[in-house]
Image: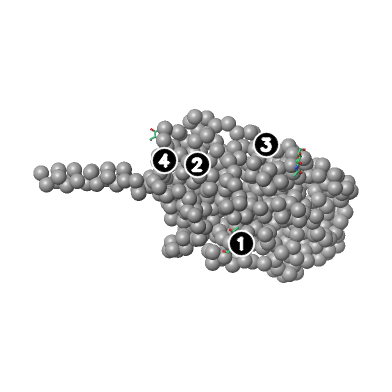
Amino acid sequence: MLTTTLLTLTITLTLLSLTSPSQSTTDVCIIGSGIAGSSVAHFLRQYSSAVNQIRIFERHPVVGGRMATVTIAGETFEAGASILHPKNYHALNFTNMLGLKVKGPSASDSSMSLGIWDGEKFLFKTIDSDSKNQVTVDNFLRYYESKESRPVFSNVEDMLKWADLYNLTTRTLEEELVGLNFSPLLIQELITVITRINYGQSVHISGLAGAVSLAGSGGSLWSVEGGNWQMASGLIKRSDVTLHLQEEISSITNVGDFYELNSTNGNSYTCQITVIATPLDELAIQFTPEIYIPERKLQHTYTTFVRGVLNPAYFGLNSVSDIPELVGTIESPDLPFTCISVLKEHSANDFTYKLFSRQSLTDALLDQIFSIRNETLRINWGAYPHYHAPEEFAPFILDDLHLYYVNAFENAASTMETSAVSAENMARLILSRLAGQQPVGAHGLKSSTSDSNLQHPEL
Ligand SMILES: Cc1cc2nc3c(=O)[nH]c(=O)nc-3n(C[C@H](O)[C@H](O)[C@H](O)COP(=O)(O)OP(=O)(O)OC[C@H]3O[C@@H](n4cnc5c(N)ncnc54)[C@H](O)[C@@H]3O)c2cc1C
Ligand SMILES: *[C@@H]1O[C@H](CO)[C@@H](O)[C@H](O)[C@H]1NC(C)=O
Ligand SMILES: *[C@@H]1O[C@H](CO)[C@@H](O)[C@H](O)[C@H]1NC(C)=O
Ligand SMILES: *[C@@H]1O[C@H](CO)[C@@H](O)[C@H](O)[C@H]1NC(C)=O
Ligand SMILES: *[C@@H]1O[C@H](CO)[C@@H](O)[C@H](O)[C@H]1NC(C)=O
């Protein structure tokens, strides 16, 4: 008898709390723990208290996605995204807020010599990195304007048009440069080398991706000491997120007022809002109802780390010290690699190198390029979109409801910072649509941007 009463009481209280208007019931599920997913969680918490639970699903055992490190011969290096621009303000703020350290360009980085190898000889052997790119960089800074003057964008096209960047996606970098009177030789032998290094592609990428790529070739570049992935890890820890590592989402089903997410672990989750924070192009997530996005290919970049010594004879040189610290390449079907750079000189005859290539580098080939090769490590990245002009964009809102896609912005350019910028807009888009449709309590957008999240204890 007493038990029944208690039970009734408990049920009544539960029902009360469920229907109480001050109780928010909006759960957000985010797929992907890279800079995009972790930034969405961060900005949702910073801008609102209307969101109840935030789950992040990550199929890998670690967070960070394309921000990752490798350890070779006991030393740690960036394996994917490595450099940040001095005006990458979200990354800079995350780094400061999370108590991480900026690793500046080392003396050797800022004076790094560049060589351009055509398969037989060096066409070019040093670089003056003065890019005519200031206009594009300044336009991009508009995305840091205050929320009062900056609209919430519901598609990539509007977001780019607002900052006068859209036109750059309608023409190739080559067309832009020819229009700016760059000589064909400079385009072939210098600009191409840089776009190959940054995006593994030629000057047929869009003007915008090209401009971003050139901005990444200047001085004063930086990274997070100990690994850029710590930005994702830190943001997740301070955003009160339920993190599901090694859990891959295999299906997303719209079931009326919420989505049902099933994972390959056999679990099922429900959430009112679902955010895809990973490129969908190579994934087999089953959507019900189906979604439609423009077809997009990812450019694969094979990253090979070698501890050893390059073979000067391969480059037609006599001594290792004649080989530049960064060897770029031009577009040529015979060239097996895109670039080779020295990550660290341990001694005159002992280096750690990083190679980029469009195909996997065989041992036989590496044995020609290197005279000593003590340790080799290979990663095949689905690295960034294969860019086109005119570029086509997937929608931010995949189903006109609450299924969102942060990585639609990657067709503009793919960098850590652009992912964070897209994520910040995404958080605002989610909250404004949530407020407009009133499925939650009376919280809405916080009027102040003050970082109330600072009170969350570090985990
Ligand atoms: C070799 C290389 C060099 C680069 N260099 C630079 C650079 O110098 N500077 C720069 O700014 N940018 C660089 N980039 C680009 C940069 O890495 C990306 O733009 C950025 O990191 C993308 O972040 P993201 O969060 O959008 O995606 P990701 O980092 O790819 O995160 C997506 C996450 O989702 C997870 N996931 C996917 N599917 C599922 C699923 N079904 N269920 C659960 N989890 C799933 C993935 O495992 C991944 O962890 C480089 C990229 C590469 C590959
Ligand atoms: C970065 O932090 C500074 C200081 O808190 C703030 O004024 C600025 O608006 C922040 N920038 C961005 C892009 O959030
Ligand atoms: C972009 O192109 C359109 C059409 O060609 C033109 O009207 C517009 O002025 C251009 N905008 C910018 C910022 O160059
Ligand atoms: C997801 O899992 C639930 C519970 O196991 C199941 O009923 C449903 O059919 C699954 N959905 C899909 C699309 O597989
Ligand atoms: C590389 O391997 C060779 C042969 O095994 C060895 O003599 C040399 O010391 C090694 N060098 C480094 C830097 O480990």
- The image position of residue 163, as x and y in percent, is 68, 48
For label 1, the residue is 92
- Whether the residue under disc 1 has CB within 8 Å of ligand 2: yes
Q: Which of 148 and 350 is in front in this view?
A: 148
Distance of label 1 from label 2 (alpha carbons)? 29 Å
- Please report whichever mark, 3 or 1, sits nearer to the chain's N-terminal start: 1
Left or right of 195 in this view: 235 = left
Left or right of 154 in this view: 238 = left
Distance of label 3 from label 2 (alpha carbons)? 24 Å
Q: Nearer the viewer, residue 163 or 377?
A: 163
- The image position of residue 394, as x and y in percent, is 61, 37
- Please report whichever mark, 3 or 2, sits nearer to the chain's N-terminal start: 3
Res. 277 image quadrant: top right
* Secondary-structure class at tag 2: helix
* Secondary-structure class at tag 3: loop
Name which residue lies at 48% across and 41% down: 436
Q: Which of 378 and 245 is in front in this view?
A: 245
Residue 90, compared with residue 19, is above or below; it is: below
- Visible residue check, residue 114: no
For label 4, the residue is 439
* Secondary-structure class at tag 4: loop
Residue 258, compared with residue 357, is above or below; it is: above
* Secondary-structure class at tag 1: helix
For the residue marked with disc 4, what is the amino acid? Answer: Pro
Mark 1 crowdedness (10 Å alpha carbons): few <14, some 14-19, many ≥20: many
For label 2, the residue is 433
